[in-house]
């Protein structure tokens, strides 16, 4: 069935929908924000009023919401998708959520004969749109083969993590913890450069060509220097992801020196009113809290 439903068409979901439409897939979309659905209708998507309506008869459902509570509502809530799905349909779980939640959803779907693909994504909307985002896939090989056409349509950068749902989610949290650490480190370094009276653009150029470089640091600090905090990835998302990563660490009996510090910075940024800004706004926080005017 060369049709797919996408529930949650924010930055990432909309980019995936547009990519699939461009490749000739029949795409149904559902979101609480009618404007987002309408924008995709203009590209050829079919608007649906509920996850159940979107999912009935489709080959696969891509869940692209924010957290586990929203996944629960999409799958098992009122007008939830699971009630109208069955074999050989599949659900791709793309949000960054706790591994135990992914395992729980996969088990409950399996009880209904629905395949579950643990498929968190990374790279941002531009990469989702052009098919270069990372997809971390954990599911049984038969499930992977059944959904391979869709997975490969979404991205050319597929990481086959394991056959065990939950391992994709864990991998994503490990990645996002490091992304958070790198971003806080970059913002701290740039706030220090500002305090020292250095030219920020020149300093960032040096960092980008030297040992301090990180992709997320360069990407976000470029935005910060332009005063561009229009959200591509909200502060609230890395606040959630770093918190989830630290909860996994505690459950595994692991304690590192940097993750908790990064988590606390994102929590402080959210408390300061930056939760819905781009996560580049950690520079605003660290500049302000270190006695500098915010950008």
Image: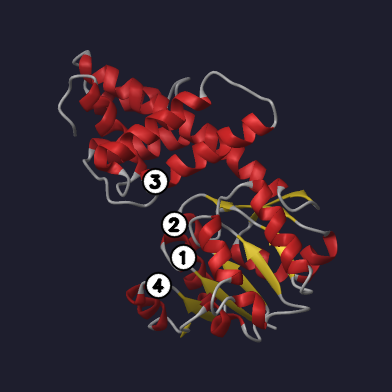
Q: Which residue is at a point 55% across and 70% down the rendered structure image?
A: 74
Q: Tag 2's secondary structure? A: helix
Q: Is residue 177 left or right of residue 58?
A: left
Q: Which one is in front, 165 or 26?
A: 165
Disc 1 designates what residue?
15
Of the image marks 3 and 1, the number of the one nearer the N terminus: 1
Q: Tag 4's secondary structure? A: loop
* Depicted 127 relative to depicted 88: above or below: above
Q: CA distance from mark 4 to mark 1?
A: 17 Å
Q: Which residue is at a point 37% across and 48% down the rendered structure image?
A: 234
Of the image marks 2 and 1, the number of the one nearer the N terminus: 1
Q: Which one is in front, 248 or 281?
A: 248
Disc 4 designates what residue?
32
Mark 3 vs mark 1: in front: 3
Residue 25 in view: no
Of the image marks 2 and 4, the number of the one nearer the N terminus: 4
Residues under numbered marks 3 and 2 in contact, where contact means CB atoms less than 8 Å apart: no
Disc 2 designates what residue?
126
């Amino acid at each position: 069935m060369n049709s797919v439903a996408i529930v949650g068409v924010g930055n990432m979901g909309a980019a995936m929908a547009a990519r699939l439409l461009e490749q000739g897939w029949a795409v149904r979309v559902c979101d609480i924000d009618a404007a987002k659905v309408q924008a995709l209708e203009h590209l050829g998507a079919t608007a649906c009023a509920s996850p159940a309506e979107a999912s009935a008869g489709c080959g696969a459902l891509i869940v692209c919401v924010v957290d586990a509570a929203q996944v629960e509502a999409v799958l098992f809530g009122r007008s939830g998708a699971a009630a109208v799905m069955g074999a050989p349909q599949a659900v791709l779980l793309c949000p960054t959520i706790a591994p135990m939640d992914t395992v729980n959803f996969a088990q409950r779907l399996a009880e209904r004969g629905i395949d579950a693909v643990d498929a968190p994504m990374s790279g941002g909307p531009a990469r989702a749109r052009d098919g270069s985002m990372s997809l971390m896939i954990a599911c049984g090989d038969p499930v992977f083969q059944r959904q391979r056409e869709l997975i490969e349509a979404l991205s050319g950068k597929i990481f086959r993590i394991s056959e065990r749902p939950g391992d994709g989610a864990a991998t994503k949290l490990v990645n996002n913890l490091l992304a958070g650490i790198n971003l806080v480190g970059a913002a701290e370094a740039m706030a220090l450069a500002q305090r020292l009276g250095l030219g920020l653009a020149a300093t960032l150029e040096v960092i980008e060509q030297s040992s301090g470089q990180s992709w997320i640091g360069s990407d976000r600090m470029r935005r910060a220097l332009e005063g561009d905090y229009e959200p591509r990835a909200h502060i609230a998302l890395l606040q959630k992801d770093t918190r989830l990563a630290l909860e996994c660490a505690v459950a595994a009996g692991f304690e590192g020196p940097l993750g908790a510090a990064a988590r606390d910075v994102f929590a402080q940024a959210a408390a300061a009113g930056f939760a819905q800004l781009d996560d580049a706004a950690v520079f605003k926080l660290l500049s302000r809290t270190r006695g500098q005017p915010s950008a």
